[in-house]
Amino acid sequence: MTTTRFAPSPTGFIHVGNLRTALFNHLIARKAGGTFILRIDDTDPERSKEEYVDAIKWDLEWLGLTWDRVERQSDRLDLYHDAADKLREMGRFYEAFETPTELDLKRKKQLNMGRPPVYDRAALALSPSERDALRAERGDGVWRFKLDQERIEWTDGILGDISIDAASVSDPVLIRMDGQILYTLASVVDDTDMGVTHVVRGSDHVTNTATQIQIIRALGGVVPDFAHHSLLTGPQGESLSKRLGTLALRDLREQGVEPEALLSLMARLGSSQPVELRRSIKEIAEGFELDQFGSAPTKFDHEDLYPLTARKLHGLDLAEVQADLDDLGVPVEMAEAFWTVARENITTRRDLADWWGLCLNGAEPLVAEEDVDFVAEAMALLPEGPLDPEDWSKWTSSVKEATGRKGKGLFMPLRKALTGQERGPEMAELLPLLQTIPARKLAKG
Ligand code: GLU
């Protein structure tokens, strides 16, 4: 059965880059009627925080990326230690005692000599007594997996055929000096144990995949299908890594981005298919194919989320925004008329507050110098409230008659005087909602 997982480390809030990974894995599982696992990669007790676990779940729920199971790596440490023992018994695991500074020095020397900075396996040449002496002097070492020096090959779901020479990769450290199990091992144990069939993740993991394929084989597991999606860049192709802090899902939500907008964009960006608003995960899953994604870095502009957000909102019924209107305090009897007026004129739900503010308090009139007399005359003709939808045409007809103005020269100054803006809702529908009309004070006489 198709099984995928999204495996965030709870060391921060998830951002648009992580979302791509989560979404692709979710869609693969949903399309196949399979299982989607949320795996919390929390083997680092210092950096992992419970608040981030909660925030990750909240973000995924907001998007509707529901999971069938949650697993936590911190609950599974025994399994990782068992796997480590197995690798030790097989002679594929060795202890190394170099300090970070020593490793750094080795790397610099290699680079100076024009060689790739690959770990030289000096620890493999240690005799048992040398090893004991180092351990006595420095404490426990790190544990490295001994790669077979052959080419590691797989057909990547996005990148196509990949072949990596294991000799160009350092033997990966799987256990740190302080005994902490590292992700490279934990992930492999979990993927095997949980029957994960497809792993989609960012292309920054390609080298990891090469080493993990060897570890999976050493442990007797089945290698899943791997696919590596491109990394996102900013609109100009600039690296997003520094800006990702501001592209957290919680921030986008805060700015009023709708989940469907985010999902619709992320499910198609970087693929050969056009971006269109889809209103459900099911609809999004329908056209989703991994092989339609390219390997080139994918440009992401968060501004693209707003037209999609607006399109979603324009299609909503009153019932779907009732909670927002209640929060703003829109009286029930005005809700329908207010939504009709506001609907086409909002980009995000946050804009509702501005339109409601206009209805309640009116706007500072915007009057061009050449319109001062005209507006004064018009305001004198505006009937006292409460107004109804017919009043707009009655009023503008009488203004037309009195002033001789017509068309844009008639309507635009009135709109600007009443709303303080050049664009906005149908004035006939808006007028009856205006509780206060500051422009009245401009009336002549
Ligand atoms: N915790 C890893 C990460 O966030 C998971 C990578 C993977 O999908 O294997 O990078």
Image: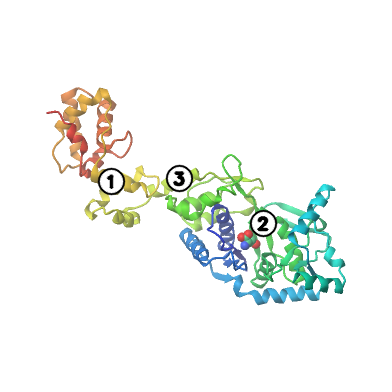
Residue 88 makes an appearance in the image: yes
Q: Which mark is residue 227?
A: 2
| Residue where numbered disc 3 is placed | 306
Which amino acid is tagged 1?
Gly
Seen at 70% across and 56% down, the residue is 206
First in sequence: mark 2 vs mark 1: 2
Residue 132, image x and y in percent?
Answer: 82, 74
Instruction: Categorize mark 1 by other alpha carbons within 10 Å: few (<14), some (14-19), many (20+).
Output: some
Residue 424, image x and y in percent?
Answer: 32, 38
Element at label 3: helix
Element at label 2: strand
Which amino acid is tagged 2?
Ala
Q: Report, in whole angstroms, how far the alpha carbon at label 2 lies from the one at label 1.
A: 50 Å
Which amino acid is tagged 3?
Tyr
**Dot in front, 3 or 2:** 3
Element at label 1: helix
Q: Find out if the beta carbon at label 2 lies less than 8 Å from the nearest ligand 1 atom.
A: no
Residue 423, image x and y in percent?
Answer: 33, 35
Q: Which mark is residue 357?
A: 1
Seen at 58% across and 67% down, the residue is 40
Disc 3 and disc 1 in contact, CB within 8 angstroms: no
First in sequence: mark 3 vs mark 2: 2
Q: Nearer the viewer, residue 407 or 435?
A: 435
